[in-house]
Amino acid sequence: MIERPDRDTPVYVISVAAELAGMHAQTLRQYDRLGLVTPSRTRGGGRRYSSRDIDRLREVQRLSGEGVGLTGIQRILELETQVEALRSRLAELTAENHALRESAGRSPRVFAAGRSGEVVALRAGTRPQPRGGSTALALWRPRDWPFDD
């Protein structure tokens, strides 16, 4: 059985990528020079495009057709990449948060933060003890917090 490559595997030569994206090969070379779509390279320097690169080429073509300039397209693609990275990081942190909640038995935690930035975990229902005359701010989340997962 033949396995299909994943979306990031560079398999398409420039002529095939150009045909799949509905563009001329010279356009792909220009987009590569500008950094809009940067394909992988073979040892001999030939370009190899992945399915993800083809999708990106189509997105560049769509934005260009809507009147967005190449500089604007480059910025849009950079922002989309940042959003994707942030979503990935959010998913990681959410999973970590759920794991920590499970390991802690979902018991409420209370923390105190002092003026110098120290953080102290407290038992629920207790107040922070002033150290050296400084006051600390107690932070907690009520049990009926509406934004809980």
Image: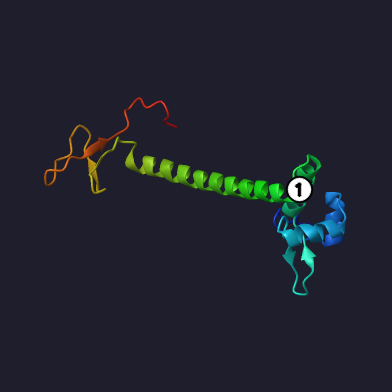
Q: Position of residue 56 (x, y in %)?
A: 73, 50
Residue at image coords 74%, 50%: 70
Residue at image coords 81%, 42%: 65
123 over 14 or under it: above or below: above
Q: Position of residue 45 (x, y in %)?
A: 77, 72
Q: Residues within 10 Å of mark 1 (few under 14, many from 20)?
A: many
Q: Does dot 1 land on a helix, a strand or a loop?
A: helix
Quadrant for residue 140, please give it: top left
Q: Amino acid at mark 1?
A: Val
Q: How many marks?
A: 1
Residue 12 showing in the rendered view: no
Q: Nearer the viewer, residue 22 or 6?
A: 22
Residue 68 showing in the rendered view: yes
Q: Position of residue 47 (x, y in %)?
A: 78, 65
Residue at image coords 47%, 42%: 94
For the N terminus, the image quarter is bottom right
Q: Is 149 on the left or on the right of 38, as rendered? A: left
Quadrant for residue 100, please give it: top left
106 over 5 or under it: above or below: above
Residue under numbered circle 1: 60
Q: Nearer the viewer, residue 140 or 70?
A: 70
